[in-house]
């Protein structure tokens, strides 16, 4: 299915999952504002900023430009599998 027919939260989730295949991803929100939760073993040993940079890199095109569909990430939770329990 082309991404243009998929909801924006699902587009963000799909891009994160493509960049981080081991991740469990949840994206909620709308109106350009989103909440993101990612659990991934790739976060092992990384500080919060590095974890968030990995996630943002996955969907940076959706945040680029004045008419970007994603305006803000209101909250981002990044956990290792051990932290997620």
Image (tube, grey):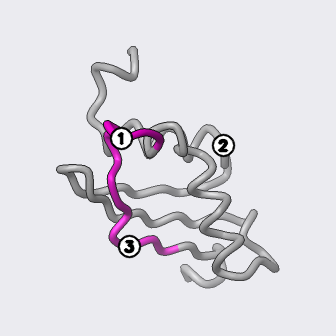
What separation in Å lies between label 2 and label 3 (alpha carbons)?
Answer: 20 Å
Q: Which of pointers 2 and 1 indicates the residue nearer the eye?
A: 1
Q: Badge 3 is on which residue?
A: 75
Residues at circles 1 and 3 in contact by the CB criterion of under 8 Å: no
Residue 19 bears which disc, if any?
2
Q: Badge 1 is on which residue?
A: 66
First in sequence, mark 1 or 3: give its number.
1
Q: Residue at x 67, y 52 (%)?
A: 22
Q: Quadrant of residue 72?
A: bottom left
Residue 65 placement (x, y as % from top left): 43, 39
Q: Which of pointers 1 and 3 indicates the residue nearer the eye?
A: 1
Image position of 25 with respect to 64: above or below = below
Image position of 8 with respect to 78: above or below = above
Q: Residues within 10 Å of mark 3 (few under 14, many from 20)?
A: few
First in sequence, mark 2 or 3: give its number.
2
Residue 74 placement (x, y as % from top left): 33, 70
What residue span does the magenta drawing correspond to? 64-77
In the picture provided, is 48 more to the left or to the right than 30? right
Q: Secondary structure at mark 3?
A: strand
Residues at circles 2 and 1 in contact by the CB criterion of under 8 Å: no
Image position of 46 with respect to 64: above or below = below
What separation in Å lies between label 1 and label 3 (alpha carbons)?
Answer: 21 Å
In the displayed orientation, state which residue is furthest to the right. Answer: 45
Residue 76 placement (x, y as % from top left): 45, 71
Q: Quadrant of the C terminus?
A: bottom right
């Amino acid at each position: 299915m082309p991404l243009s027919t998929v909801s924006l939260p699902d587009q963000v989730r799909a891009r994160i999952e493509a960049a981080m295949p081991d991740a469990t991803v949840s994206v909620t929100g709308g109106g350009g504002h989103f909440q993101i939760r990612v659990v991934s073993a790739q976060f092992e040993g990384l500080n919060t900023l590095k974890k968030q940079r990995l996630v943002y890199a996955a969907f940076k095109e959706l945040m680029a430009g004045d008419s970007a569909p994603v305006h803000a990430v209101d909250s981002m939770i990044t956990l290792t599998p051990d932290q997620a329990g």
